[in-house]
Image (cartoon, rainbow, N blue to C red):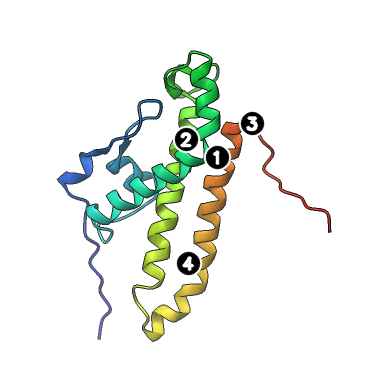
């Protein structure tokens, strides 16, 4: 008996963007799917929900930072272009990385609970580690935007 799994391809709806508040960019579903290596097994609807949730989480973490920038007359993250990489502000790149990683982590959490077969149970451990890495990447990007250290230390 052969094991064969067909991977669904992304569809036309992936060209949609998830809107955002005016300071931050809309997020293109197709860009998230490509950069996070999400195939068509993740439905567009599920991806849209994860992206929207990720936008909310990242925007909440950047709330005070955004207010400070807006008080200084900056109307969009695109206006913060003191360092450009591949034609984009480093802040825009970091923001997208935070949202994309957060959305992927949310999706991975959902799929850990999706298949509880014996084979899948063996695959759960690497997925849990992957979820942690994705959240870490999102947090690093957020802390880089805020200009904070990536390390958190406590006195014991």
**Residue linked to disc 1:** 141
Q: Position of residue 146 (x, y in %)?
A: 60, 32
| SS at circle 4 | helix
Q: Are marks 1 and 2 in contact (CB under 8 Å)?
A: yes
**Residue linked to disc 3:** 147
Q: Nearer the viewer, residue 45 or 8?
A: 45
Q: Nearer the viewer, residue 40 or 81?
A: 81
The quarter of the picture where the N terminus appears is bottom left
Q: Mark 4 vs mark 2: which is more N-terminal?
A: 2
Whether residue 95 is visible to the viewer of this picture, yes or no, is yes
| Direction right: furthest residue | 156
- Residue 155 falls in image quadrant: bottom right
The quarter of the picture where the C terminus appears is bottom right
Q: Are marks 2 and 3 in contact (CB under 8 Å)?
A: no
Q: Mark 2 vs mark 3: which is more N-terminal?
A: 2
At horizontal 42% and vertical 21% (from top left) the residue drawn is 76
Observer-side mark, 4 or 3, equals 3
Q: Mark 4 vs mark 3: which is more N-terminal?
A: 4
At horizontal 17% and vertical 45% (from top left) the residue drawn is 13
The crowd level at tag 3 (other Cα within 10 Å; few <14, some 14-19, many 20+) is few
**Residue linked to disc 2:** 95
Q: CA distance from mark 4 to mark 1?
A: 21 Å
What's the mark number on residue 127? 4
The crowd level at tag 4 (other Cα within 10 Å; few <14, some 14-19, many 20+) is some
| SS at circle 3 | loop
Number of numbered tags placed on the structure image: 4
Q: CA distance from mark 1 to mark 3?
A: 10 Å
């Amino acid at each position: 008996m052969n094991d064969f799994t067909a991977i669904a391809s992304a569809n036309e709806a992936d060209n949609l963007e998830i809107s955002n508040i005016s300071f931050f960019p809309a997020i293109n579903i197709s860009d998230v799917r490509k950069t996070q290596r999400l195939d068509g097994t993740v439905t567009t609807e599920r991806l849209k929900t994860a992206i929207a949730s990720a936008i909310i989480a990242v925007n909440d973490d950047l709330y005070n930072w955004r207010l400070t920038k807006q008080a200084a007359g900056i109307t969009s993250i695109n206006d913060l272009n003191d360092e450009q990489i591949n034609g984009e502000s480093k802040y825009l790149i970091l923001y997208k990385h935070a949202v994309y990683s957060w959305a992927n982590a949310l999706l991975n959490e959902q799929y850990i609970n999706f298949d509880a077969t014996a084979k899948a149970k063996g695959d759960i451990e690497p997925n849990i580690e992957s979820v942690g890495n994705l959240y870490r990447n999102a947090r690093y990007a957020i802390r880089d935007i805020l200009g904070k250290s990536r390390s958190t230390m406590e006195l014991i």
